[in-house]
Amino acid sequence: MDSAPRHIAITMDGNGRWAAARGLPRSAGHKAGLTPVRLCVEECSRLGVEALTLFAFSSENWSRPAEEVASLMGLFFEAVEREIAELHRQQVRVRFIGNRQRLSVRLRAQIAAAERHTADNAGLKLQVAVSYGGRWDIVQAARRLAAQCASGALRPTDIDEDRFAAALELGGLPDADLLIRTGGERRISNFLLWNIAYAELYFSDRLWPDFGKEELADALEFFAGRERRFGLTTGQAMKARGP
Ligand code: IPE
Ligand code: IPE
Ligand code: MG
C-alpha cells in the first residue's frame, strides 16, 4: 500500500514574507513558524507516519544577515528547551541533521541533550535539519567511507547504494516518499538530495506560518493520488503493489 507516506520531508519556507506582509521583523515570521511545526508533528504522530524531516536552516542560510542568523539560532535553542518535554510525552524521537561544527557549543549541547532524552522513544522519528545541505551530506558520507577504505576496514568495491545511504545523515530511515515545500518556490534548495530520488513533490503557495491541518491533508491527498512506478510500467507497478 503506498497511499500513505512513511517518510515526509518539509521545506518550511515563507516565514520572512509572512512577517513582511504584517509589517513585522523577519524574526517574527520564524517565531510564528513554530505553530505549524507542532501541528505537523502531532498530525504525523496521529496518522502513524514513521518519519518527518523538517528543513529549518540550510548551509546557505549562514550567509543571511548576522542579525537574522543570530535570532534563528536563539529561536532554535529556545524551541528545543521549550518543546522537548512535550515531544517526549508524545513519544517522538528527535534527531538533528546537518553540520554541527558551525553551531555554537551551547546549541550543540542542547540538541545533543534532546537527542539523548528522546533516543528510546518509539513514536514518530523527527529529524530537524539545521545547518544542513544535501551536498554537504553526500560529501561527508563519502569521507566516512573513504576513511574506512583507507584504514582497510572496507574495500572500494564493497561500496554500493545501500552502504552509501547508510553513511548519510538519514542512514537507517526509509527514503522520503513525499517532499512538501511551502512558500510558492518550486525548488530543492539543497535539501535532501540522495533521499528524495523518488519522492513525490508537493508545492504549496501557503507561507509556512499559515500552513495548517487542511494544507497537510491536501498534501496527503495529493500523495494518495499519485501512481508510484519507480521506473516500471503502469502494468508492472500495479502487479508489484498487489491486489
Ligand atoms: C524559511 O523562511 C526559513 C528559513 C530559511 C530559515 P524564509 O526566511 O526563507 O522566508 P522567505 O522565503 O524570505 O519568505
Ligand atoms: C530553504 O529556504 C531553506 C529552508 C527553508 C530552511 P530558502 O528561503 O533559504 O531557499 P531559497 O533561497 O529561496 O532557495
Ligand atoms: Mg525563503
Image (cartoon, rainbow, N blue to C red):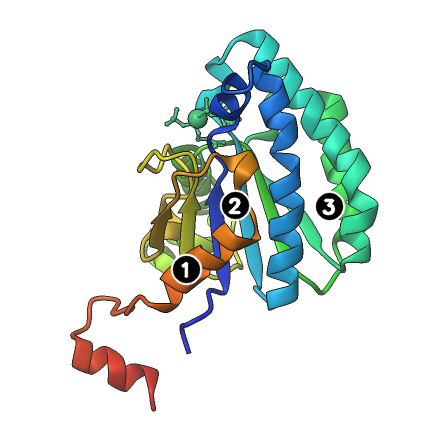
Residue 176 visible at all: no
Number of callouts: 3
Q: In the picture provided, is 219 more to the left or to the right than 96?
A: left
In percent of the image, x 68 and y 49: which residue is there?
A: 94
> Three-letter amino acid code at disc 3?
Glu
In percent of the image, x 73 and y 28: which residue is there?
A: 77
In percent of the image, x 38 and y 54: which residue is there?
A: 155
How far apart marks 2 and 1 lie (CA) works out to 17 Å
- Quarter of the image for the N terminus: give it: bottom left
What residue sits right under mark 1 in the picture? 177
Return the residue found at the far front: 22
What residue sits right under mark 2 in the picture? 169
Q: Earlier in the sequence, mark 1 or mark 3?
A: 3
Q: Which one is nearer the viewer's eye here, 161 or 118? A: 118
Q: Earlier in the sequence, mark 3 or mark 2?
A: 3
Label 1 sits on a secondary structure element that is loop
